Amino acid sequence: MAKIAELVSIPARAELKHVSKHWTQTGCAYDDEYDLEEDISEHEIPSDAKYTLCVAREYDKQNRRVMKTTLQVHSEALQAILRSVIDTHPGESFHPSDISIDFAVYCLYHYRTELKRALAE
């Protein structure tokens, strides 16, 4: 139960956020919460970092097709559990400071029993 208490006390909002990443005509990335009339700075804190989990859809440079969808894990407690249980999975690494898992998230399904056990400890 200690892990559940730790997850509840995190500073990020305990929610799943969906974000679409688009491109400006000058090639700068922005998410769908920004107004293109505003100045978009690549040095701003991404709005999705305020959430525990974020599903990000990245579009092609013409903003027509989704090229990549990822699950981003911003919770340090969840990151620690993923690192301790999964460590590595073909095509995925859980050692970077920002964990981003390509969809479909098969590795989470494959390790679901171990993840439930680690969360309960």
Image: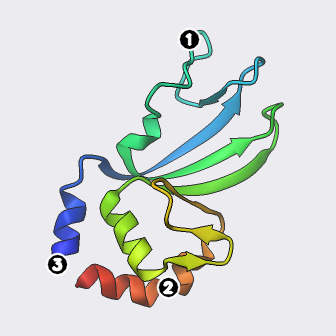
The CA distance from mark 2 to mark 3 is: 19 Å
The CA distance from mark 2 to mark 1 is: 42 Å
- Return the x and y of residue 20 as percentages of the image width and height: 62, 40
- Return the x and y of residue 72 as percentages of the image width and height: 51, 54
Q: Report the side of 83 relative to 42 (left or right).
A: left
Q: Tell me the SS state at disc 1.
A: loop
Task: Residue under label 1, please give it.
Answer: 39
Which amino acid type is marked by label 3?
Met
- Return the x and y of residue 6 as percentages of the image width and height: 19, 64
Q: Tell me the SS state at disc 2.
A: loop
Q: In this view, does 71 lie above or below 40?
A: below
Determine the residue positioned at 44% across, 34% down. 47
Determine the residue positioned at 30% across, 47% down. 12
Which amino acid type is marked by label 2?
Tyr
What label does residue 1 carry, if any? Answer: 3
Asked if the residue under mark 1 is in contact with the one under mark 2, i.e. CB atoms within 8 Å, the reply is no
Q: Is residue 66 above or below residue 27?
A: below
Q: Report the side of 3 relative to 17 (left or right).
A: left
Structural crowding at the residue carrying mark 2, measured as other residues with C-alpha within 10 Å and reported as few (<14), some (14–19) or many (≥20): some
Which amino acid type is marked by label 1?
Asp
Task: Residue under label 2, please give it.
Answer: 111
Determine the residue positioned at 51% across, 67% down. 94
Asked where in the image residue 45 lies, by quadrant, the reply is top left
Name the residue nearer the viewer: 104 or 45.
45
Q: Earlier in the sequence, mark 2 or mark 1?
A: 1
Structural crowding at the residue carrying mark 1, measured as other residues with C-alpha within 10 Å and reported as few (<14), some (14–19) or many (≥20): few
Q: Earlier in the sequence, mark 3 or mark 1?
A: 3
Asked where in the image residue 78 lies, by quadrant, the reply is bottom left
Name the residue nearer the viewer: 70 or 35.
70
